Amino acid sequence: MSITQQLIYLFVLAIPVASIAWTITHEEVIREFRETCHTKSAECPRLYQRKFFYLFTCEYCFSHYVALIFLVITRFQLLYPDWRGYLIALFSLVWVANVYMSFFGMIRLDLKKERVEIAKSEATQSASPLNGSL
């Protein structure tokens, strides 16, 4: 596979890795599970238990495991056709996925900020005594 194809694979494979890692660690659909993991990561008596549950609360940590699963499924290697290719692919995939998640987080923050500003503007307009109803 050419280096161009490998880079395309890298950037495409990072999309589902980022999507899965973000969904598990941020989205409302599994909030209860994540809250339970957060509590257990702070309260479990054993270090390995705390670290296991922490895994589901940190997108960076979780993305390593998701990337590893995708590498096992796809057998994607980067630059070298042996174990070094898997190692480079793993860390490259994690890095690109985390860049995607950072961009997504910034976009969501901007959208939320705009929604708050719109709601504030609408509330101010509806609370105004001279809002056009004379």
Image: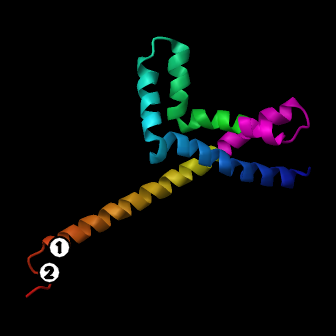
Question: Image point 61% across, 51% down: which residue?
Answer: 100
From this view, report whether residue 40 is shown above or below residue 2.
above
Residue drawn at 79 percent across, 39 percent down: 73
Q: Position of residue 69 (x, y in %)?
A: 72, 36
Residue 18 is marked as: none
Pick the quarter of the image with the C terminus: bottom left
The outermost residue toward the top is: 45
119 relative position to 51: left or right:
left
- Give coordinates of residue 85: x percent, y percent: 84, 36
What secondary structure is marked by label 2? loop
**In x, y percent, where is residue 82?**
90, 32
The crowd level at tag 1 (other Cα within 10 Å; few <14, some 14-19, many 20+) is: few
Which element is circle 1 on?
helix
Which residues fall within the magenta stretch? 69-96
Could you say which is closer to the camera, residue 80 or residue 21? 21
Residue 27 visible in image:
no
**Is residue 16 magenta-colored?**
no
Question: Mark 2–mark 1 contact, CB under 8 Å?
Answer: yes
Magenta stretch: includes residue 70: yes
- Label drawn at residue 131: 2
Say which label, 2 or 1, has the lower sequence index.
Answer: 1
- Give the vertical position of 23 relative to 128 (above or below): above
Q: Which numbered tag is attached to residue 126? A: 1
Query: As drawn, is 119 to the left or to the right of 53?
Result: left
Which of the two residues, 33 or 57, is positioned nearer the viewer here? Answer: 33
Q: Main secondary structure of the magenta part?
A: helix
- Tell me how many marks there are: 2
Instruction: Identify the residue shown where x is 28% and y is 65%.
Output: 119
> Callout 1, which amino acid?
Ser
For the point 55% across and 45% down, which residue is it?
Answer: 22
